[in-house]
Each structure stands twice: as C-alpha cells, then as structure tokens.
Image: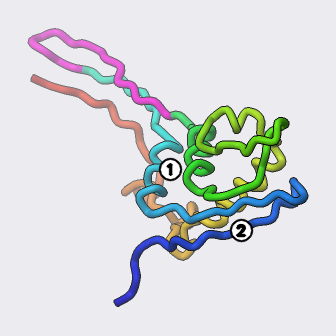
Amino acid sequence: MPKGTVSQETFRHELTSLPGGFVELRQLSYHEMMRRRDIASKLFTEQQVSRNRKEKRTEEMLRAQLEIMNVATMEFEFGNCIVNHNIEDDNGVLLDFKSPMSFRMLDPKIGAEINRYIDDLNQEDEDDLVPLENAATSSLQDGLIEPAMITDQD
C-alpha cells in the first residue's frame, strides 16, 4: 500500500549568511499547513445593510477584518520546522525558535535565508495551483464581481 503520511526525514542546510551555521528542517504536515494558512490571513470587509422592520427602515454596517499575520506565521513555521540548529546568541546560548524573543535578536539575513529553505520545503505542488489569470472570480461573464446590497424585509 502507498504511504500517505508526511515524511519524518529532515533536511540539513548550511547557512551562507552564517559561516559554520546550519539548520535542520522537517516538512509540515497537511494539518500544520492548514493551520499556517489560518494564521496567515483573516478577512476584513464592510457592507451596508438595510432592514425594514414594522414600517421602520434601519441602516446597519456589517464588518469583518483582514489581518496579514507575517510574524505569527513565521514564528509558527520556524517553531515547527526547525528540528536542529547551531545558531547562538551573543552569550553562546542556542536560540530557541519556539520563543518569540529569539526572533527579536535574529540577524535578518540569517532569518531570511532560513525562511527561504522553509518555504522551499513546504511549497504546494505548482500543478495543483490555479494560475490567478485563470481562476474563477465570479459567475458573471466579464468576471467582475458586483457589490450587492443586502436587504431584510419583514
């Protein structure tokens, strides 16, 4: 039977931004990838709503929020993908990538290099992705999305 679970194999990368430094990474599971997506973005939208209730018309504003959570996503990825490393602070203590304080001290070049390795390891197959120009945006023929006014009639 074919194996369908995430590999426990780790991948060692020598850091060009830190001579003598290395990170050993593991791939995220499907569940972890979905959690990463949940962390990565939230939606904010605002819509005017008209309601007619017993001869009284009211206007309400419905709101939702979009947050881009780069820091939270990076903390999740580093904390879950880095299984071993030799990166130390100024006192010779290994950085703990499960602790947000380590990221405040981390050299940005080193962080960016590690982030590239993590991204490469956890990219979805490009064959599974729909190019943006081909993605369905709506059921309208011209592909535009028309805003709709929500009304509630009693």
**42 sits to left or right of 26:** left
In the rendered image, which residue does mark 1 sit on? 36
Seen in the picture, residue 147 relative to 145 is either above or below; the reply is above
Rounded to the nearest angstrom, the CA distance separating label 2 from label 1 is 22 Å
Name the chief secondary structure element in magenta: strand
**102 sits to left or right of 99:** right
Dot 1 amino acid type? Arg
Q: Which residues are magenta?
A: 51-66
> What x and y, as percent, mark residue 127?
54, 76
Residue shown at 18%/26% (left/top)?
152
> What x and y, as percent, mark residue 118?
65, 59
Could you say whether the residue bearing mark 1 is in a helix, strand or loop? helix
Q: Earlier in the sequence, mark 2 or mark 1?
A: 2
Quick one: label 2, few (<14), some, or many (20+) residues within 10 Å?
some
Residue 12's disc is 2
Residue shown at 58%/64% (left/top)?
26
- The reply to whether the magenta stretch includes residue 56 is yes
**42 sits to left or right of 16:** left
Residue 59's disc is none
Q: Residue furthest bottom?
A: 1
